[in-house]
Image: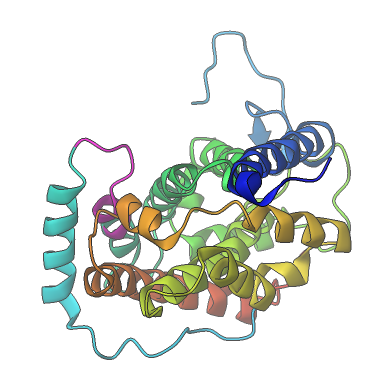
Amino acid sequence: MSCAASTDMSCRRILRLLIPLALIFLFLYLSTTKLHPPLRECVRDGKPCVQEESEVIPKPEENQVGDLSSLQGDDTYLQVVESSLKNCKGKNFQIGKMLQSFHSCVTEDQEILLEHYLEAWRELIKFMDSMGTVFTFISSETKTKINILENYRNGENGRSYRTIRSMMKYELENHVVNFKELPSNRVPSGCRTLLRMHRALKWLEVFLYNVGTSPGQDKTSEMCAEAYHKTLSHYHSWFIRQVAEVAFLALPPLEEMYKVVCVRTHEEARVVLLTTVEAIVKVYNITQELYTVNHMLDLP
């Protein structure tokens, strides 16, 4: 039965709830049955190992996005962190904490500390969860990948997983990286696992940039879809791309996203989001270069 004009808004609200929920259940099913090893998988050199009962183990088009030259470096960074922590007080997601985590990733020697990289992703997951069910399938996959990398960091060769560079060096020298199709009995290497997160990071970077530079009239669904087309869609099958297109329609309006990042106006959003993007871009570019020089951008 078609909806009359007077009930059109109600129908849209119902569809906005039902469609994402159906998609999420589908993604969760695929994730748990086909895509991932067990969350508490014991890992040694990329292979499953016997775990004692008492043991508890806790290609993108561009390297940069837009022009961020108008930002004022450390001064702006500190102001954004201070104001966002104040404005977001009491909320589960605080964009200031996410910004701090990405900022802490990079050392003076331009190394990426894996511990802080994973912490930054935990904050990104909180951001995605704050946007509603539309991002649940991405955050669910990311949690699994974080768990895999944490197992490597806490394993017997954990010292080799201090930075992304040291991880790559260790896994390449010890033949942990598999350049062919991953066997079903093998846990993904740290390099392969992080590459998937690296690709998703580019998508979120471009999405945040689009929102930060939007004049305030664009739809978040369109901005997110545009970012997806430029980045992550290249690595997805036709089916996944179609499902993602529909899921983006459930994104909240721009005003709701402003509330998520604890700002009131477009100008405030621009400063907060572009400062965050600047920190993400730095981490992304260093990581991209490491994958490029080690010929691992296309790991299966």
Q: How many marks?
A: 0
Question: Which residue corresponds to the image point at 74% horizontal and 42% vertical from the top-left?
Answer: 23
Q: Looking at the image, which is closer to me, 57 or 298?
A: 298
> In the picture shown, does residue 42 fall above or below 297?
above
Residue 19, image x and y in percent?
Answer: 71, 43
**In this image, 224 relative to 105: left or right?**
right
Q: Residue furthest top?
A: 53
Residue 59 showing in the rendered view:
no
**In this image, 286 relative to 39: left or right?**
left
**In this image, 47 relative to 202: left or right?**
right
Residue 169, image x and y in percent?
Answer: 58, 64
Give the magenta part as a residue range.
90-99
Q: Looking at the image, which is closer to me, 183 or 72?
A: 72
Residue 51 lies in what quarter of the image? top right
As for residue 92 lying within the magenta part, the answer is yes
**In this image, 2 relative to 55: left or right?**
right
Residue 271, image x and y in percent?
Answer: 24, 74
